[in-house]
Amino acid sequence: MDVALDDVFIDEISFPATDGYALTGTLFLPRGTKRHAVLINSATAVPRKIYRGFASYLAHRGCAVLTYDYRGIGDSRLPAMVGYNQPKSLVGFKASMSDWAARDVTAAVRWMRERYQGLPLAYIGHSFGGQALGLIENNTDISRAALVASQAATWRLMTSPEKYRVYAFMNFVGVPLVHALGYAPGWAGVGEDLPKGVFLQWAEWVSSPRYLFDSKLPALENFANFKGELRALCFSDDPWATRPAVELLASGFSAIMPEVLTVRPSDVGAKAIGHFGFFRPDHRDTLWRGVAEWIQGE
């Protein structure tokens, strides 16, 4: 176990998904009393290291925090049999976005709930991470959920001209490329390499008027089971998670009244926030503090 400079213990761990697949995560623990447990769930094609600063901040405030990589991403990608520290090719790797939710996110919630039984469990979902909250069968274990730039990401609700670029890339570049290569390469502009099934399901949802709500996933029934507190943040300069897209996702949680907040960069003294900017350390005393106080009920 390593000790961070900001008075937080940091431990690299592994835990099994529901089907036994080994997922890699990082546990951030306060030096003092633990008052809350927090699970941070990543965006699509985004490794957990992006959330390290925010996780350390929450741990410093008394939270036990877990970040982790979905299967096929970051350190949850199988290593190559030859070569030094090289990941195995994703060609033939079986995974979809619905698998990430049902097998990986479900397991992460279970692991945190079992390990910190006496603490309230909060859920942070960035983009896809927030979408997964509605798909998992054990979302009833979560007391509060803060969704960050998390949306029903249909291209129709993105801003122009970005919406047309996304539609064209997904359907006329991404899908043919994935079928040709057997996976979605990060160099094409998607972030990290993605398993074929993940990208194809993502492209299908993006092309549908109501995103994942137009799919026939039985797991959609789990949206109505969540009865905790939910706050969804959208940022006025985010071309993907626009307020209508965030509201569409929030509407799926039919048992509650989610709170949707729009933040302008000028509200927090920033020039830009966008889809990823929330997790920059310069928001420590503004956006980070606001979310931390909310999930801790302060």
Image (cartoon, helix red, strand yellow):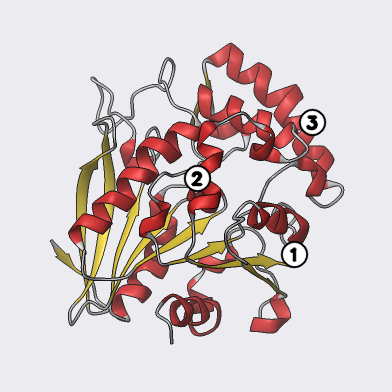
Residue under label 3, please give it. Answer: 168
Report the side of 60 relative to 203 (left or right).
left
Q: Residue furthest top?
A: 180
Q: Identity of the amino acid at label 1?
A: Asp
Q: Identity of the amino acid at label 2?
A: Asn
Number of other residues with Cα within 10 Å of mark 2, as a class: few under 14, some 14 to 19, many 20 or more: some
Label located before the other in sequence (3 or 1): 3
Q: Circle 2 sits in a helix, a strand or a loop, which is it? A: helix
Residue under label 2, please give it. Answer: 222
Nearest to viewer (mark 1 / mark 2) = 2
Distance from disc 2 to disc 3, alpha carbons, whole Å, reads 32 Å
- The quarter of the rendered structure image containing the N terminus is bottom left
Q: Is residue 35 above or below residue 91?
A: below
Locate residue 103, reporting x and y percent. 36, 36
Query: What is the quadrant of residue 175 in the picture?
Result: top right
Label located before the other in sequence (1 or 2): 2
- The quarter of the rendered structure image containing the C terminus is bottom left
Residue under label 1, please give it. Answer: 237
How many marks can you see? 3
Number of other residues with Cα within 10 Å of mark 3, as a class: few under 14, some 14 to 19, many 20 or more: few
Q: Which mark is residue 194?
A: none
Q: Nearer the viewer, residue 182 or 135?
A: 135
Locate residue 253, reporting x and y percent. 59, 55
Q: Nearer the viewer, residue 222 or 260?
A: 222
Q: What residue is drawn where x is 68% and y is 57%?
A: 246
Report the side of 117 relative to 243 (left or right).
left
Q: What residue is drawn where x is 49% and y is 38%?
A: 192
Does residue 27 appear anywhere in the picture?
A: yes
